Image (cartoon, rainbow, N blue to C red):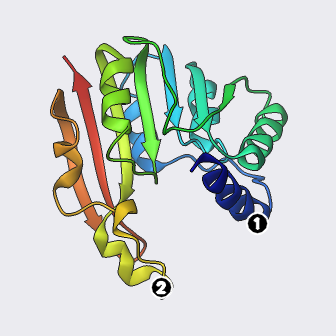
Amino acid sequence: MAIEDRERWNHKYIAKPPPTELDPDDWLTANAKLRGANRALDLACGLGHNAIWLAQQGWTVDAVDISTVGLSFAREFAARQRTEVNWIEDDLDTYESPPDTYDLVVVTRFLDREQLPRLIESTLKPGGVLIYQTFTVHQFSRCERGRHNPNYVLQPGELPRLFPALSVLAFEELNDNERAVARLMAQKT
């Protein structure tokens, strides 16, 4: 599976130009400022916007993605921003992180119901926070015909249920003109 995933994401990133402006997720920027900067993990980091923004806020950041192309663009962009991030090329199906390591874990626009909850709950330190945003089933109305895979979108109210060991600090679902997403901020107690 890893080879197919890597090829699919590499193809996606090759098809568009590398980033020239930093564009971190708005749910992250609204909520990460409330936390004291320490160690952060960005899972499925893509082009690295969130990881770079966190590092610029004083966080020590590890950023994981399967795409060699995405990580290459992210490294180049971070270097132009004079920002240090520890970029890790790995498959989230098999990625392991030491337990109780991170004060913050970030996931945006990625869903793996099988692996991520276990990984996130394990790698967060007690008191650590998860900031997660991804698409809901309502996003299908915005997608091209034939690109409707329910494995990659949430059902209404599903996101907090994926993390029963975390305490919900904030949760919302948006379905507006731009996107249909679920957003969660939760803490390991």
Give the vertical position of 3 relative to 119 (above or below): below
State the residue position of label 2.
Answer: 146
Q: Amino acid at mark 1?
A: Lys
Q: Which mark is residue 16?
A: 1
Mark 1 surroundings within 10 Å by alpha-carbon count, few (fewer than 14), some (14 through 19), many (20 or more):
few
What kind of element bears circle 2?
A: loop
Q: Residue at x 44, y 35 (%)?
A: 106
Give the vertical position of 169 relative to 183 (above or below): above
Q: Residue at x 50, y 33 (%)?
A: 94
Figure quadrant of residue 105: top left
Residue furthest to the bottom = 145
Give the vertical position of 185 relative to 57 (above or below): below
Q: How many marks?
A: 2
Which of the image's four quarters has the C terminus? top left
What kind of element bears circle 1?
A: loop
Horizontal arrangement in the rendering, residue 181 relative to residue 40 (left or right): left
Horizontal arrangement in the rendering, residue 161 relative to residue 180 (left or right): left
Q: Residue at x 78, y 36 (%)?
A: 75
Q: Residue at x 50, y 16 (%)?
A: 39
Horizontal arrangement in the rendering, residue 69 relative to residue 153 (left or right): right
Closer-to-camera residue (44/25) = 44
Q: Amino acid at mark 2?
A: Gly
Mark 2 surroundings within 10 Å by alpha-carbon count, few (fewer than 14), some (14 through 19), many (20 or more):
few
Which percent across, then down, holds residue 84? 72, 23
Q: Earlier in the sequence, mark 1 or mark 2?
A: 1
Which percent across, then down, holds residue 109? 46, 54
Which percent across, then down, holds residue 23? 61, 50
